[in-house]
Amino acid sequence: MSAGEGDAVGASGGGPKARAVEEWRDVYDLLDAVRQRPNAWVRNGSLQELAVMMSGYHLALQVHDGAEAFEFHRGSGGFASWLSGTRGWSMATGWDAAIMENLPGEPPLDAFFRLVDEYREFAGQPGS
């Protein structure tokens, strides 16, 4: 399957438009790219794979002394703390598991991006 086939997992609608990789400024640009073409980034729209990719992003920031504040730690940090505080969800197994457990009727990536949009507004992170 080519990178563009089967990308319509439902998560690609709405939201900020993805920038070219060389124009990325932060993790939100990566997330915008994933939203636009989810299956090019994560198999079968897997929220767990996205969470692992986000951990890799954080590791790269640390290795390369990136100045960016990373808010997508699986069990703590900005996004997880916000979810816990606004929804009352446990983050013991990470934001990915919490989303799937607490929103079982919604496709996981759709739920994630809807919540990221809310978090971006809360955190003052404008869209592209």
Image: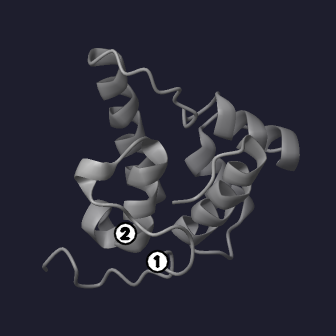
Total marks shown come to: 2
Question: Looking at the rendering, which quadrant does residue 17 occupy?
Answer: bottom left
Residue 23, given in percent of the width and then of the height, sits at 30, 51
Residue at numbered disc 2? 38
Local packing at callout 1 (Cα closer than 10 Å; few below 14, some 14-19, many 20+) is many
Distance of mark 1 from mark 2, alpha carbons?
A: 7 Å
Local packing at callout 2 (Cα closer than 10 Å; few below 14, some 14-19, many 20+) is many
Question: Looking at the rendering, which quadrant does residue 45 occupy?
Answer: bottom left
Q: Nearer the viewer, residue 116 or 74?
A: 116
Q: Nearer the viewer, residue 70 or 44?
A: 70
Residue 54, given in percent of the width and then of the height, sits at 41, 41
Residue at numbered disc 1? 12
- In the image: residue 114, left or right of residue 72: right
Q: Is residue 62 above or below residue 90?
A: above
Q: Is residue 80 above or below residue 119?
A: above
Q: Which of the marked residues, 1 or 2, is nearer the chain's N terminus?
A: 1
Residue 33 in view of the camera: yes
* Residue type for callout 2: Pro
| Residue at x 55% of width, y 35% of height | 74
